[in-house]
Amino acid sequence: MAHLRPSTPLIRIFLLFVLLPHSSLTTAQAIDVADWSALEQQARGQTVYFNAWGGEPRINSYLNWVAQTLEQRFNITLQHVKVADTGETVSKIVAERTAGNDTNGSIDLLWINGENFAALKQNKLLFGPWAEEQPNFSLVNANRFPEMREDFTVPTDGLESPWTRSQLVFYHDSQWLAEPPQTIAAILDWSTFNPGEFTYPRPPAFLGSTFLKQAVLEISNNDPALFAPVTDDQFQRVTTELWDYLDALHPTLLRAGRYFPNSAAELRRLMGDGEISLALAFNPNEALLSVRTGELPDSVRTYVLQGGTIGNVSFLAIPYNAQHKAAAMITANFLLSIEAQARASNPNHMGSTTVISIEDLDVSARQQFEPVSTDLAAASPDELSRKLQEPHPSWTPALERAWIQRYSAR
Amino acid sequence: MSNSDLELKDVSISLGGKQLLEINCSVGPGEILTVMGPSGSGKSSLLVYIAGFLAPVFESSGSVLVNGADVCSLAAERRHIGLLFQDPLLFPHLSVAGNLRFALQSNAKQKNQAISEGLNDIGLAGFDDRDPSTLSGGQASRVALLRLLLSAPNAVLLDEPFSKLDTQLREETRTLVFDKLRASGLPTILVTHDQADAEQAGGEIRTLL
Amino acid sequence: MLRWAGHSLIFLLAAPILLGTLIASLPAFGYFPPLGSSDFSLEAWRELFEVPGLTRSVLISLISGVLTPLISLALVFLYLASATGSKLDLWIRRLVSPLLSFPHAAAAFGLAFLIAPSGLLSRVISPGLTGWERPPDILIVNDTWGLTLLFGLIVKEVPFLLLMSLAALPQLQPRHRIEVARTLGYRPTIAWLKVIAPSLYPLVRLPVIVVIVFASATVDVALILGPTLPPTLSVRVLSWFNDPDLNLRFLAAAGSLLQLGVSLIAVAIWLALEKFVGLLWRFWLAAGNLNTGEGLAFAIGRSAMPLVLVVIAGSILALLANAFAGPWRYPSALPSSWTIQHWANSLSDLSTPLFNTVLISVSSTLLALLLVVATLESERQSSKSKSTALWLLYLPLLIPQIVFLFGIIVLTEFVGWQANLSLVIFGHLLFVLPYVFLSLSEAYRQLDPRWTQVASTLGASQLKSFWRIRIPLLLAPCLTAVAIGMAISISLFLPTQLLGAGRITTITSEAVALTSGASRNLISVWAVVQLSLPILGFMMALLIPKFVWRNRSGMIDTR
């Protein structure tokens, strides 16, 4: 009960009335993140509540497979708690701390990156460090790929374990648009002559925010200020041209910029309905997979802008008050295994991009990964190697807020 | 034969301080007292009071004695006072026999036999499984009467029970009801508009103002 | 014991909601110890009023809060005035309960696909009538002033207000009154409006206020149909709550109090409007035997309701078509092929949510039925007039969900309840109860008291006449109330998601999660499942009494 800080009258009243019968009787077992076999022992019989975006059926069914495998091998029950927005999960952790629930948290593992991670890390709401103790962590070769230890420029400090890679890609319907624009500036030129054929999700939808970041990176020519915490002056200086650009672009967008789709899925539906000819996605395989299901016409092609596009890594983290930390770590380590990563990167299953450094693997392990797709709808590996770094996470909310300030009430 | 009697002693009912009625009377076994009066004279309130359903907005005083015992403090279901309404009010979800069985005391013996004998008695032999809504008006009234008698009451109240029947049927039903009540030796209070009812009842007639 | 039923019922409902509202509103004044802030300040309010487009958000919430009930009620009254007793009426009365159960998120999604520039309607008339090879670039869904939102809300609320009016009508003995008015020379539609409407309105006033609050504070319908630049106030409050920037909590709390204020202002505007219309009506009544307007009122009344039905049917059709559609390119009126692939893909994911949905809706509804019947029975036995405290029952419908749910979560955390099934069931109970009460109370109160009196004079105890007489006589209304309660429970999203911490998934929570990423086909599969469950419930409510009372013609249509 010591954690409850009964410092305020209101909380004292609650303590009197409602907390008497309830105190956490389970003394949390000591967790030694370095002793992996002890962790496996502790994890047996535990249930891991894994809060992850539940909007994508392919990811959901991949996680079903993970759950079955964990059950068989480690006697761990994985329950995928489907969330629409990681912000909800952050909210939930805060609500638990509000109530003084510091040991019986309802979330054991969450899919996270960027400003969500930054917020939790800053408020010390994450458990760890643990991630680099995982046996499978070496597979990502963090020395060669520093992005495995940096989440939007913020050091992960072992608080999160890499899960998948994402990269911003554009896709176009070649039936209506044969030669898609290759730069942010070219998009404006093209859209001016072809009004109503492009739009992007409304920030703070993450794909919309990513478009803003892509635009500001390209317009400012990767200004170094973008990779440090944002300040008012720098923000003013770096984004002035961005707003000029958007002021010019918006009237040329679908519905003359008086409407923006809610999510990547809504954007994809607009493409499938023939409302627009150019769209964007954060999973390089998204268009390919949607063509296969018939949601998008087979004339759709994916590409990467000339100067490269933003790529990032998303991670798994454990809240400070998680009840089943041992099982959460075993789960994260399994998700990072060659077997799980190979299946995840298979377009027939989840279709994501792996975080494992495939070149470092021996031949037999390498063969578990599908060969690179030569499908017309997919972007080439060559294109995908043109990668831009995410700005510092403080830029994301700053850009989102400024966007809302300027465009949400016109 | 029941051979009980019913006595109303200084019964007074008022609403909002205004007295609706005041009555003193005694009804012997097999006797039928007729209460007449214009609408609003409180004659229906009287029956409701005796049966035990008077709404709390009414103020009442006096006592109702059944076989000399005051029943005023008892709940309606413990007064053993039967009531026939204008409508037969056969429970629509029960069969004819189900309606009759509902009235029998739970400890009554040979229920089925009592029911078929009773039906036979009112000229409806074999109607046990009938849906009450398929009965004619006269048949339904007779079943309602039989149901009342099977509940073994100590006194009976009739609230214009024939007013909804046409002239021909009214005559028949009235005769049957009065005969049965007299034969059972039950003290009865009849409330009616109809002079013919009062005449055939053959007992004392009180008129409320 | 029964005497306590009413009180405990009210306490059960009122306490968590009032406490939840209180707790959720503290951060609005700067009090939020977990973020290190325990000093009271008005900073959050200053910030709130600087939010761009706030006035527009508030205005749109207000407009939908006032216009939705106004137009819906007008349509319902004109319909009742013009169609009572007609063949059309017979049909619509049968359809109204199942229609009410159409979950709003599914309805909104279907409607959006029906009327979008690339939607079903546009596909049917293109390119033949329009020459469109690609969808026209016009803003219909998510329009700036929320007209589509208003339209969607009206389509949703008309069945609700119609059902409530139909439940209240019998006690006015409309046929008798209309006959009297007609012998005085009034035409039927005008007669209804002059004689019945003024006495019916007070009986449906509470449901109308429920509509005002829902329309001014809806989240799920506004997310799908509402404007996006800026969104309605409720949608913005939710996004502030979910923002990873924890400092927005203060803003969110202030916003939710503002939402409460906006809903209250909408109600206040309504009450003023009520006075004004009442005055007009009195003039109109005093004007005497005028039949002007009969034709217009008749035409609107007769045509608007079928139009609402057609829109709902169109939305259902749109969902069904998408659930079985293969590739479907614009402007084809039909998909290029039909497939059950979407169903095959969802089958394995459906079972757990389906089981949870049935479990939660059945238990919360049966619990609600028990409490409601106990309350109504105690009200009957005490033979007092309606308890004034009963309006508290409607608290969960009168305070916007978003205002008190966050507080309830904090509250349950204090109590130390882990998210679990019973908590979710309790949360559903809060919302199911008022609807069960609304739908059952009139039938219960109107049951002829002579049935019980007859039973008593036959020596039956209260208990015996309750079980053997009242419950069987009220079987059909009880089953309808159960069907409505289950339908409400099935459509609930926020309580399931928030109180279940996302661990307890229902068809609705899964469907909403899928809208952020899945294909339209897959979303439609879930929407079709979501809407067929309540329809099953209503079919049972209709068929069970028919079967049980197949040999009791007096039990059919006695209501």
Image (tube, rainbow, N blue to C red):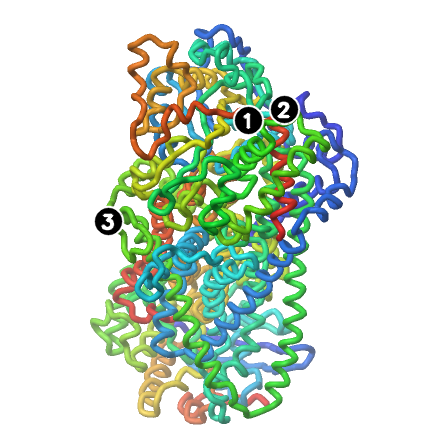
Q: Horizontal placement of B132 versus C300: left or right?
A: left
Q: Are marks 2 and 3 on the same chain?
A: no
Nearest to viewer (mark 2 / mark 1): 2
Dot 3: within a 10 Å radius of its alpha carbon, few (fewer than 14), some, or many (20 or more) residues?
Answer: some
Going by the numbered disc 2, the residue's amino acid type is Pro
Q: Nearer the viewer, residue A209 or A257?
A: A257
Q: Which residue does the image show at 59% across and 82% down from the upper left?
A: B23
Q: Which mark is residue C338?
A: 3
- Callout 2 secondary element: helix
Q: Horizontal placement of A53 versus C266: left or right?
A: left
Up-down relation of residue C559 to residue A68 (above or below): below
Q: The residue marked by circle 1 belongs to what chain?
A: A
Q: CA distance from mark 3 to mark 1?
A: 43 Å
- Callout 1 secondary element: loop
Q: Which residue is mark 2?
A: A224
Residue C156 in picture, x, y percent from top left: 46, 60
Q: Is residue A14 visible?
A: no
Q: Nearer the viewer, residue A405 or B20?
A: A405
Residue B166 in picture, x, y percent from top left: 34, 89
Q: Which residue is mark 1?
A: A390
Q: Horizontal placement of C52 versus C304: left or right?
A: right
Up-down relation of residue A131 to residue C401 (above or below): above
Q: Nearer the viewer, residue A281 or C417?
A: A281
Nearest to viewer (mark 3 / mark 1): 1
Up-down relation of residue A312 to residue A128 (above or below): below
Q: Which residue does the image show at 29% across and 31% down from the upper left?
A: A375
Q: Earlier in the sequence, mark 2 or mark 1?
A: 2
> Residue lying farthest left?
B126
Q: CA distance from mark 2 to mark 1?
A: 12 Å
- Callout 3 secondary element: loop
